Image (cartoon, rainbow, N blue to C red):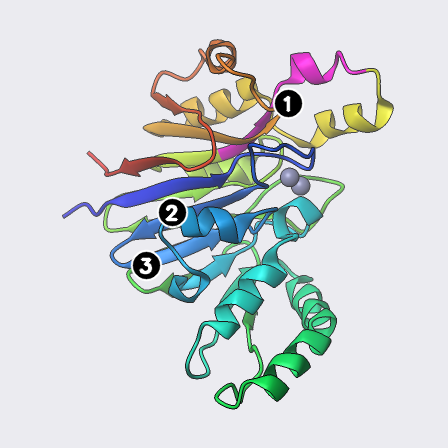
Amino acid sequence: MSGSITIVLLGTGSPLPDPHRAGPSTLVQGAGVNLLVDAGRGVVMRLSAAGVLPVMLNAVLLTHLHSDHICDLNDVITTHWVMTSSPTPLAIYGPPGTRQVVDKLLEMLEPDVGYRLAHHNDLTYEPAPVVNEVIPGDVFAVGGFQVRVGETDHRPVAPTVAYRVEIDATSVVLAGDGVPCATLDELLVGATAYVQTAIREDLVKLVPSARFNDILDYHSSVAQAADSAQRAQVATLILTHYVPAPALGQYDEWRGLATAFTGQLILGDDLTSVTIESA
Ligand SMILES: [Zn+2]
Ligand SMILES: [Zn+2]
């Protein structure tokens, strides 16, 4: 048995507000397990559209602590908590710094938690996420999934990590933001699928804004993502977190920049879903 994994692009947007794209977050499903990777803008709405409520999540995996990847984590925590009928820990994995972020989110939520505890007689416990800070090389299990942590290069943002999620012979690497690097290459070798956030270098360069152009040096271009995928011989490359967001009919232009990759290339709107299985 080779196992099968379904990947749902919950949010394909970026920090730039977009009425049609939620912020970066990806759902990984297999063997009855739901993993949420990153928790960007609108994540709970997109999760519900994918048929998954926060209480159905087995774990949340954070690639890094940039706001666009965690800005709705508080909604995941609150909605998970208020929909449980008994204390149910929410497992959150992330790089060092994650514990502090979650502790401060809980601090922010203190008034709300107080209101709800005072109002609902049957709600007698506070939200209690369990944070596991991870470093490259760590391996852990969530249900039937094996997860391996690898280092990414999103400098000056650090630490940042990618996750390789495996079940039987099928695996997907969720790389988050960053430029190609040896440690990501190593994590990718032989993976069935590779989810990479990607930007259109050619279009970003046309925008006369120094702050906007700063994004060029720490995100993979489409061509760089294609090169990484080809080097590792992954079967499927999935691009997300598009900057700028592709307009109607523009996906073909994006595809034209990824010709170095000879496998299956997936691009799409929010809720694009692909099921992979190793050959
Ligand atoms: Zn980032
Ligand atoms: Zn980002």
- Whether residue 265 appears in this view of the structure is yes
Residue 204 within the magenta-colored segment of the rendering: yes
Residue nearer the viewer, 15 or 146: 15
Q: Residue at position x 60%, y 58% from top? A: 73
Q: x%, y% of residue 232?
A: 41, 29
Label 3 to label 2, Cα distance in Å?
14 Å
Amino acid on which the number 3 mark rests in the picture:
Val
Give, as a single range, the part of the protein colored magenta: 196-207
Question: The residue tagged with tag 2: helix, strand or loop?
Answer: loop
Q: Report the mark closest to the observer, 1 or 3.
A: 1
Q: Please give the residue where the numbered disc 3 appears in the rendered image.
A: 33
Q: x%, y% of residue 224?
A: 56, 22
Q: How busy is the neighbourhood of tag 1: few (under 14 within 10 Å), some, or many (20 plus)?
A: some
Q: Please give the residue where the numbered disc 2 appears in the rendered image.
A: 50
Q: Please give the residue where the numbered disc 1 appears in the rendered image.
A: 244
Q: How busy is the neighbourhood of tag 2: few (under 14 within 10 Å), some, or many (20 plus)?
A: some
- Whether residue 163 appears in this view of the structure is no
Disc 3 and disc 2 in contact, CB within 8 angstroms: no
Question: The residue tagged with tag 3: helix, strand or loop?
Answer: strand
